[in-house]
């Protein structure tokens, strides 16, 4: 197998050495979300979120004349637009503080900006290419009204150019706080939404602390299609020769998209996702892997127009007789 250094030489883009704290990176092109993007995303992830599937239902719930863009698709488009900063990425380690400031509707146009919030060298080792961690602050706005629709932090491991020396960055990148305090999320609830059209309560009660296992596993397929759809420029998701392992890595958002679809199979009266407290990629996923899902209700609050729920979603990868954990995701939902 070729060395990481030789593989990375053919990959253009910003190296770890080129980054400085506070730097604002050149943006990717703006993107208008049409029925085409929505249909392709649905064909890949199969998410049964009712407000993003049915136009008549979306009208009743939101009072608007257009479908809601699935929060999963919105997030993956934002991440894809941010990869202009991380074409030399080795791995994405975590997301934190993802807040969906308002719903996005079909036909709206997204613009994403990326700022370097912190940098940290990783120890030089003879058995791997030089590298460091970059904490990215990402904000996606709607061009139509210049409103922020989502902001968050993403931590990426990025190759350095100089094999003998690193820049000397030692910023404190903070920690991932996994505890969800639901009172902190109430401001993101769409107060005007009417959830009475989401159907009769036909699901079993879910007790706080109870873990539910989805009986339906899912096989990862069409990974390249999701990468292209979301304009993700990370070569490790497109070209196996640029990957440290020699295998093309599945974009981590693909795993998240399938996990959200699994959660919505268990929550047929869910209206939307308000945000992610944290999301940690624990291991790699490859095309054709089989994923299993389990979800734990951590907390729940009843509001005047619905419920907000704190949920921990865990995803495992099944390969033959071996099972490994690949995702730990803490999110907040709003539904009936």
Image: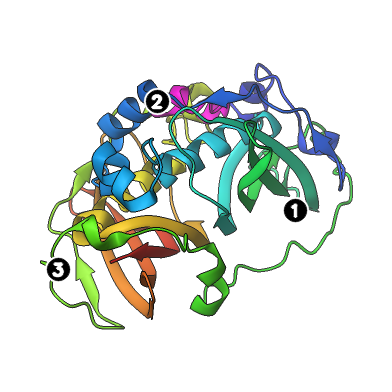
Q: Report x, y in % for residue 170.
A: 84, 58
Q: Looking at the figure, which quarter contains the C terminus? A: bottom left
Give the residue displayed 71% in from the left and 67% down from the top. Answer: 174
Q: Nearer the viewer, residue 181 or 327?
A: 181
Kindly identify which numbered label has been placed on residue 26. Answer: none
Which one is earlier in the sequence, the residue at label 3 or at label 2?
2
Which one is earlier in the sequence, the residue at label 2 or at label 1?
2
| Element type where label 3 sits in the image | loop
Q: Is 109 rendered above or below residue 313? A: above
Q: Is residue 231 magenta?
A: yes
> As drawn, is 306 to the left or to the right of 18?
left
Q: Is residue 51 magenta?
A: no
Q: Are marks 3 and 2 in contact (CB under 8 Å)?
A: no
Read off the residue under disc 2.
Answer: 37
Q: Report x, y in % for residue 222.
A: 31, 27
Q: Is residue 49 visible?
A: no
| Element type where label 2 sits in the image | helix
Determine the main secondary structure of the stretch shown in magenta. helix
Estimate the spatial distance between the alpha carbons at disc 3 and disc 1, rounded to whole Å.
Answer: 54 Å
Callout 2: few (<14), some (14-19), or many (20+) C-alpha neighbours within 10 Å?
some
Q: Report x, y in % for residue 208.
A: 30, 83
Kindly identify which numbered label has been placed on residue 123. Answer: 1
| Element type where label 1 sits in the image | loop
Q: Is 63 rendered above or below residue 286? A: below
Read off the residue under disc 3.
Answer: 201
Residue furthest out toward the top:
10
Which one is earlier in the sequence, the residue at label 3 or at label 1?
1
What is the span of residues highlighted in magenta in the rendered image? Answer: 224-236
């Amino acid at each position: 197998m070729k060395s990481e250094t030789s593989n990375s030489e053919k990959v253009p883009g910003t190296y770890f050495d080129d980054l400085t704290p506070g730097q604002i990176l050149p943006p990717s092109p703006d993107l208008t979300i049409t029925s085409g993007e929505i249909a392709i995303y649905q064909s890949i992830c199969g998410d049964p979120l009712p407000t993003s599937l049915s136009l008549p239902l979306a009208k009743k719930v939101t009072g608007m004349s257009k479908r809601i863009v699935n929060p999963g698709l919105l997030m993956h488009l934002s991440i894809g637009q941010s990869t202009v900063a991380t074409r030399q990425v080795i791995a994405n380690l975590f997301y934190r503080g993802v807040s969906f400031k308002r719903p996005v509707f079909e036909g709206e146009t997204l613009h994403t900006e990326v700022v370097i919030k912190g940098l940290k060298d990783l120890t030089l080792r003879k058995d791997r290419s030089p590298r460091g961690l970059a904490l990215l602050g990402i904000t996606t706005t709607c061009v139509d009204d210049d409103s922020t629709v989502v902001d968050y932090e993403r931590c990426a491991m990025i190759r350095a150019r100089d094999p003998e020396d690193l820049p000397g960055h030692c910023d404190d990148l903070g920690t991932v706080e996994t505890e969800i305090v639901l009172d902190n999320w109430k401001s993101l609830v769409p107060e005007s939404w009417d959830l009475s059209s989401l159907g009769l309560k036909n699901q079993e009660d879910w007790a706080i602390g109870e873990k539910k296992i989805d009986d339906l596993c899912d096989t990862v397929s069409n990974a390249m299609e999701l990468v292209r759809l979301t304009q993700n420029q990370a070569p490790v998701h497109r070209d196996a020769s640029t990957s440290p392992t020699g295998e093309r890595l599945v974009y981590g958002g693909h795993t998240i998209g399938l996990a959200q679809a699994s959660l919505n199979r268990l929550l047929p009266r869910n209206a939307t996702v308000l945000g992610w407290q944290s999301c940690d990629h624990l291991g790699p996923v490859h095309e054709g892997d089989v994923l299993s899902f389990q979800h734990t209700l951590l907390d729940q609050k009843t509001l005047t127009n619905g419920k907000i729920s704190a949920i921990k979603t865990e995803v495992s990868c099944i390969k033959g007789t071996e099972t490994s954990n690949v995702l730990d995701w803490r999110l907040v939902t709003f539904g009936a």
